[in-house]
Amino acid sequence: MLEVDLREIRFHSYDELVRTFKWNIPSHFNIGESILDRKIKEGLGDNIAIYYEDEEGNHFAYTFTQLKNLSDSLITILREIGVKRGDVVGIYLQPRVETVISILSLYRLGAISLSISPLMGAESVEYRIRQSDAKAIIIEGSRREVRQKLRNITKIIVADSARDESEIDFDEVKRTSGVYYAVDTKSDEPAQLFYTSGSTGAPKGVLHAHRFLLGHIPAYQLYFEMAPKEEDVFYTPADWGWIGAIGDVLLPSLYFGKPIVAYRRLGKFSPKDALAIMQKYKVTCAFIPPTALRMIRREVINPRRDYDLRLRAISSAGEAVGEDLLEWAIKKLSPNVNEFYGCTEANLVTVNNSMWRKIGSIGKATPGHEIAVIDEKGNKVINQVGEIAVRMEDPVLFLGYYKNPEATAKKFRGYWFLMGDLGLMDQNGYIWFKGRGDDVIKVSGYRLGPEEIESVILQHSAVQEVAVIGKPDKLRGNIIKAFIVLKDGYSPSDNLIQEIQEFVKNRLALYAYPREIEFVKELPRTETGKLKRFELRKKEEEKS
């Protein structure tokens, strides 16, 4: 019997589910044991766990038994190089079977998996390895510049290609035998380390316990419309160094004994390749970030017509999706497209589902999580913009910033953890995202969240992407400036600027339109695809 499974609860409404749901977080829990050791015991060893494919056309399928055997061998090698319980090991890999084996092996060993986005460069990787005191790093062989930078810092395990003499070949795993049983870890024992994208200051290590997987399960099942079902296959184009891939799709799917597709691409995201992969492997549930959804819409007019898709549910998050994009995705990709919300420190705390979906909102509090919008004194507020917060002692809440108790303390107000975002909760419990706390724009006495303005601008037929910031102004304190990427077939012009300005005035508010519009070829984003508005603000400050 699984620790958390909404399919065991009978409910017909959100309120009924909230009243009925109760956490079952055992005192001892190990993610790796629940996915590998337990699946073998339950007779599910022959089930497919990973479908792998890459741009070169290589493709393989791996069962849970194969993953368990490879994990046992990798743990033997990790122990030989001195990795022990509580040690940090970096994983700097594309989506591939080695990534899954590495993560689960570290959990089973009682060590801490440090996931690093493969989009990051040498300096970003070095910072994370140094700050975490990582004992080793498992890395793509092609990343030679990173390997050279880390050579005198930590042990290096190379996942492919020729290794240097001082490095360890991951292929040794296939030549090493051994049987290993997962250590008995407490559910609140450290297991997973992510680093924030560093939009303000140096990146901070976000440390999660084994229980964080169980905390993800209710939202996962709801945004994937009561997953898993018998024929479900899961996929995400999000990179596997991000909590949005590992926590939202990879670990929950494997926890339920269901397969996930690992598509390893070396270049940029290709909408047509992603659709072809989902068609080939009959993917039923996918987490597709908003940027990827927009790219699909731009390149493929009618995906459901052009591809034999089996999608029954799509989830999306990371930034505001927007009503226009959601409505398009429901018509052209999947009958269910559900937005959810969270952050690296406290993920999947609100969710939409077909029973209570309200397009434009980020949903209601996920059952089991107490979410509120609070004022500066920590009081709950309704129909008023405040800070989105989650109550302490939530199973998905981080243990703290790694080796940084001062930064951890700043994230709490009384018994509330501050998500760092502004929102509004209406009288029905729906939460409406209003923007990052440090992105709020004050114009003529009004407090405006950039996402609200961006969502309106995105509805204009000429706009592909947009970022909005507040620009200092002597008269008004701030004015709104929009940076816009146009769709193919549209060209910048004064007439188009005026048209977009009127478009916003008529749909939002007279004070909320962008007084300045700059057309750009691309917008600055973090490794995980989030807008870096602070870079745009910095450029404006340098101009003045």
Image (spheres, rainbow, N blue to C red):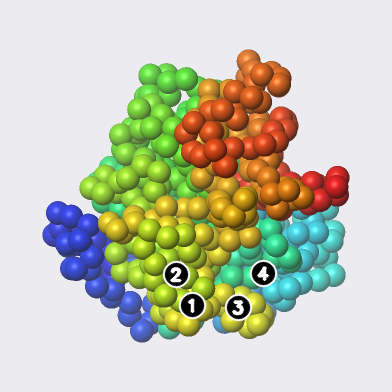
Query: Residue visible at 33% across and 80% down?
Result: 26
- Label 3 secondary element: loop
Name the residue type under label 1: Lys
Discs 4, 1 touching: Cβ within 8 Å = no
Q: Earlier in the sequence, mark 3 or mark 4?
A: 4
Q: Is residue 266 left or right of residue 325?
A: right
Which label was assigned to residue 83? Answer: none
Residue 367 place in picture, x, y as percent: 29, 64
Query: Residue visible at 64% across and 24% down?
Result: 498
Which of discs 2 and 3 lies nearer the camera? The answer is 2
Which of discs 1 and 3 lies nearer the camera? The answer is 1
Q: Which residue is mark 3?
A: 410
Query: Residue visible at 38% across and 19% down?
Result: 305
- Label 4 secondary element: loop
Name the residue type under label 2: Ile
Real-space CA distance between mark 1 and mark 3, rounded to the nearest whole angstrom: 14 Å
Residue 109 place in picture, x, y as percent: 52, 76
